[in-house]
Amino acid sequence: MLSYDAETIAAIATPPGEGGVGIVRISGPGVWQIVDQFFHPLDGTPLSVREHGTFAYGKVVEADGGEIDAGLALVMRAPRSYTCEDVVEIQGHGGSVVLRRILRRVLEAGARMAEPGEFTKRAFLNGRIDLVQAEGIYDLIRARSDRAAAAALEQMEGRLSQRFNALYDAFMEVAANLETTLDFVEDELPDDVFSGIASLLDRTFLELDELFDTWDEGRLLREGARIVILGRPNAGKSTLLNALLGYDRAIVSSTAGTTRDTIEEGFVLDGIPLRIIDTAGLRQTDCEIEAEGIRRAEAHGAEAHLAIYLVDASEPLHEEDRVRLGRLDPDRSIVVLNKVDLGRRVQIDGIETSLASGRGLADLKKAMAQALERGADLHAPPHAVISERHRALLAKAHHEARSARSLLERNIEENAAMASEHLRTALEMLGQVTGRAYHDELLDNIFSRFCIGK
């Protein structure tokens, strides 16, 4: 258990709004003194003397004895709680007014309002979880697809931490072996000692590379992908949005310029959370409102993970289409030839569709998934994947380890001391991933993203 100033904290642990049950969570060394002031069990036995894991039904009362609510209190004793501290959860009726009154009474009795993520922060500081697991909890709460939730659950359960810890231990062994050689004079060590150290260091690079390879998938699962639909007026952009969503979200009309602004909706494709953006038709116009819609469409196209460009294949290729198709990045764009049921009059490559009837939609979805999966195996079983924070620290560790390896290649005996310093820095970076090494700024950066009450 790590030392810190442990005040007793409290917060509402359920989302705002009406519900059947609302929870106020209290954690810290002063829990029993606080809860006995305002929670009166109907059987007369105070919460402070009850066993771990038991419930009590009773009333939450004001200081003057007035009743606030009736409900349950769950008793959790250290170290068997989420925070490894004494914890009580008051489960009252869901509703913002009732919960605020309960929380106000808890604070009056001596607790302090919890900061964002402070319960989880205490779980880390008390050794219940490491930083990677804490981030898994955050990812699970924010998951926008089944696959993202499954990956976050693996991370929360420690699968990713095990890989980081194994990598840390391997670097530690290399550093310890290398530093041991510094105590020997030249020519006293067997010839195979340094080659063994170099070989062990080389094996760590394989694990580093495997972890790096999960980043693209992690980015998609956590952040989702922005898909923008582009094309000239009446190419079928709004029809495509409706077809992907499975309901009529955008107005579809034969009148050109119906869509003046962007329309954005959520959608999950092969476990990838997406934001699909329908845009104004791209053309020259004197209308200021339509021109602004076109400007926004172009801006979204520049920032999107993937652009779907629709062409009306039943008409000769328009010069506007020809110019814009030439500007597309082939690695992050898909060309769709729509309205082929009316005849195909363009000679360019693309996915043939008739979106009004749904023809070609399955092929388009497959192409979208393949484009988004570049660098990520999204058909493998769900597994924990690294975040941007992990990737940045791994990159620094990789750089330091490579520097150490380069020194050992030149003159292993003369450069052993300098190589050891690089490995120690690499260990510092790896330690910050799981929390073996941490500082206040790092913790604030991680836990400030959590909601109050978690």
Image (cartoon, rainbow, N blue to C red):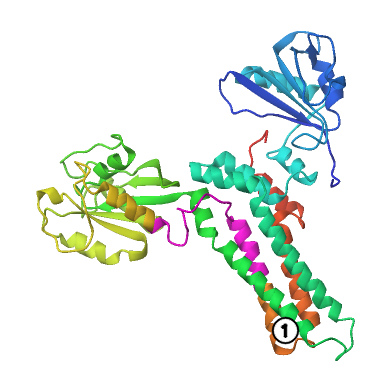
Q: Does residue 385 appear left or right of residue 366 in this picture?
A: right
Q: Position of residue 144 (x, y in %)?
A: 49, 41
Residue 112 showing in the rendered view: yes
Q: Is residue 446 above or below residue 47?
A: below
Which corner quadrant of the image does residue 84 belong to?
top right
Q: Is residue 176 above or below residue 85?
A: below
Q: Is residue 322 above or below residue 237?
A: below
Q: Position of residue 447 (x, y in %)?
A: 68, 45
Which corner quadrant of the image does residue 7 belong to?
top right
Residue at image mark 1? 408
Q: Secondary structure at mark 1?
A: helix
Name the residue at 78% across, 80% down.
418
Q: Which residues are magenta?
A: 371-399
Q: Is residue 396 magenta?
A: yes
Which corner quadrant of the image does residue 156 belong to?
top right
Q: Position of residue 318 (x, y in %)?
A: 15, 59
Name the residue at 63% across, 58% down.
390
Name the residue at 18% across, 47% down.
354
Q: Nearer the viewer, residue 405 or 338?
A: 405
Q: Is residue 215 magenta?
A: no
Mark 1 surroundings within 10 Å by alpha-carbon count, few (fewer than 14), some (14 through 19), many (20 or more): many
Q: Does residue 221 appear left or right of residue 16 in this picture?
A: left
